[in-house]
Amino acid sequence: MSREVVLKAENLVKHYPIKAGVLRRTVGYVKAVDGVSFELYKGETLGIVGESGCGKSSLARLLMRLEEPTAGTLTFDGTDVYSQKGREMRRLRRDIQIVFQDPYTSLNPRKTVGDIVGEPFEIHTDVLPKRDRRQRVQQLLELVGLNPEHINRYPHQFSGGQRQRIGIARGVALNPKVIICDEPVSALDVSVQAQVVNLLEELQAGLGLAYIFIAHDLSVVRHISDRVAVMYLGKIVEIGDEDQIYSRPTHPYTQALLSAVPMPDPTLRNVREQIVLTGDVPSPANPPAACRFHTRCWKAQEICSIDEPLLIERPDGEAAHLSACHFAEPRVVV
Amino acid sequence: MTSSLGTGGARTVEILDSRGAWKPLDGLLLEVDQLQVEFRTRDGVAKAINGVSFDLHEGETLAILGESGSGKSVTAQAIMGILDSPPAFVTGGEVRYCGQNILAMSEEDRRRIRGPEISMVFQDALSALNPVFPVGWQIAEMFRKHRGMNKADAQAQAIRLMQRVQIPGAAQRVKAYPHQFSGGMRQRIMIAMAIALDPAVLIADEPTTALDVTVQAQIMQLMADLQQERRMGLILITHDLGVVADVADRIAVMYAGRVVEQADAFELYAQPGHPYTQGLLDSIPRLDQKGETLSAIGGLPPNLTSIPPGCPFNPRCHYAQDICRVDPPPPLREVTPHRLAACHFSELLLTHSPELEVTQTTEEVEAHVELELELPAPAVKLADEQSFDRGGEPL
């Protein structure tokens, strides 16, 4: 089956300068995203997991072109995103939209739901004539499971889960092809999380959307994703389809991450082997040389601090998938 | 179990010396009995805790599981005596430590319990630690205030504790400030402060919620080791069903300020005895459900200023019948040995009885919520919600 690529990132890099002193001289760089490449296919969900500081959210901002990259290219449907200007760029923005993590701060408290969901039409005025907008907003509210009659309410009159639905309605307003979901359910309670995950899946099936689903909750990512990329300190260390990553992970970091997630089943207690890593994630301003994980890795040998392992296909027991470890071997951890 | 524990006079407290060494009887450390707390706000009285009862034994881990607004943090703060009053008022019930009701004690006596006997780890270490004092000074404060140690001895004790919680280079870092530590290290410092005086009861309020999973694993491991070594009773407050499954001996599930179910961890996960617990467990994405719709609990937790009559879960419950909608709410009762549940149909639920009728589906619950919203004055108010949970607990 040939799959159509909608979004292709090649070697994306984002370094933020660290300024110090009275002259605000640049003394170093935070290497937030450091050479990330992937392809997103039409209608699929690519999950991105990693710990805080690994560059997930910086990557989201790059994909939205809310930040200009230090290096690298991003291609959407064959168009180079970062070279577009003015009107062309605005046209392109319709196709890539975002849903933010915190439904409390990402909605303007002074605007009504109608204003918030209708704002994309104010910016992209040629999409819909003014007289049709209100009706379209009501349709959108209905689509995400809110009462269309609540169009004149304010965000504070809704609960967290409902607010996230408003954010999603705004995200799908312009009929995008790609939605970047940056931790869309992390701020929600368990019982509400499931409602929002279900909504995202329904919308994907109905509208043919492709998602980049960024989250740290590995069980939610597994549920919703077709493919999963694991990030560590600005780099993808392993990427593969959901089954490859969860059932046959070959990178030690993926294995540690998966084994550290507590499973909601007490019978697995003491049965499941847990890999407890020592220490914290090193600072992205001064990442370890070569393999960035070698300072916390139990498999690390001399080569790991000299020679950077490439993200290439490495055998995983059944077949092979991309992994960046010299000593990649499958290990069952879940 | 809990609620049936009387205040019988047989429970005596041996006081060994003038510092007040407490002795638990039959290993029973803490009993919370019909605790009630309300917040009096301008928008009305929010009934945050409505008769919560549980007990805690030596060396036991009791998990209090609930969503935001369920009253789990307020319960912890009431036990510690650190509720802001006003707006919060304890309107009923007792909290007995080694048989003595600590809610009735003078502030002076309570201070002697807080720290040496019952201690707490907070969720957000950055806001719980004082940013303008070195961490060593803050840990040492426990020894200076409670034990009357001099500065040098207290400092030495602080270093020893920092080593115990595995902070690398403790002797060098004792003079560092909280912002110079990572999130995981700050949480270790909080734990060091909490265990400084060797408490018998440790209350951990979402201790790992703000941390990454690999760091969370380290902290849970550390807490388990410390608990084993000191035979502490641990109350773990969390919303994470995974963490609970990993460490809890017993679980109390809270909803709208009530304990709706209490059972052994293994039994509870194997077979929930309350529809809310069942809903929570079902909403976790499971492997075999890949690509399917998750079974969500419809609707929202009730607003605490207007908890529905009867069982507070009835508007969202799949099995709600007329009896569930009238007061009094179903009491927390023993449905099978060592298992308490507050549901009229708990036995039917536990036995998968075909007599248990599904009266409303998730869709019908959602439709019902819509109707509720049609009524005047939307009840959700952000300011109130936030006053219940300190810090960034998921909403």
Image (spheres, grey):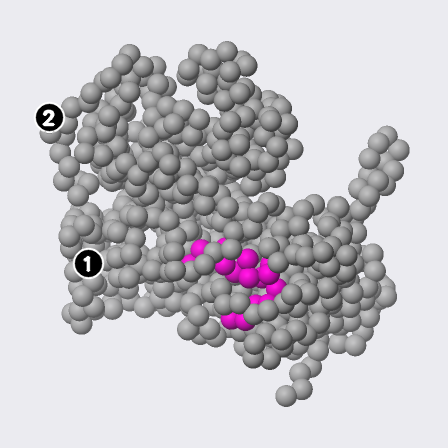
Badge 1 amino acid: Ser
Question: Magenta region's main secondary structure?
Answer: helix
The image quarter containing residue A215 is bottom right
Residue A87 counted in the magenta span? no
In the image, farthest residue toward the bottom: A1
- Position of A8 compared to A200: left or right? right
**Subunit ID for the residue under disc 2:** B
Which of the two discs, 1 and 2, labels the residue nearer the N terminus? 2
The image quarter containing residue B127 is top right
Badge 2 amino acid: Gly
Indicate the position of residue A14 as horizontal and vertical percent values: 78, 55
Q: Is residue B84 above or below residue B46?
A: above
* Circle 1 or circle 2, nearest the eye: 2
Q: Which residue is mark 1?
A: B346
Q: CA distance from mark 1 to mark 2?
A: 33 Å
In the image, farthest residue toward the front: A302
The image quarter containing residue A213 is bottom right
Judge whether residue A142 can be spotted in this image. no
Indicate the position of residue B33 as horizontal and vertical percent values: 22, 35
Indicate the position of residue B120 as horizontal and vertical percent values: 41, 32
Residue drawn at (64%, 27%), measured in percent from left and top? B172
Q: Is residue A249 above or below residue B299?
A: below
Q: Is residue B12 above or below residue B169?
A: above
Q: Which residue is mark 2?
A: B9
Residue drawn at (28%, 36%), measured in percent from left and top? B58
A325 and B53: which one is in front?
Answer: A325
Q: Which numbered marker is on residue A218?
A: none
A224 and A298: which one is in front?
Answer: A298
Q: Of helix, strand and loop, which one carries label 1?
A: helix
Q: Is residue A305 above or below residue B64?
A: below
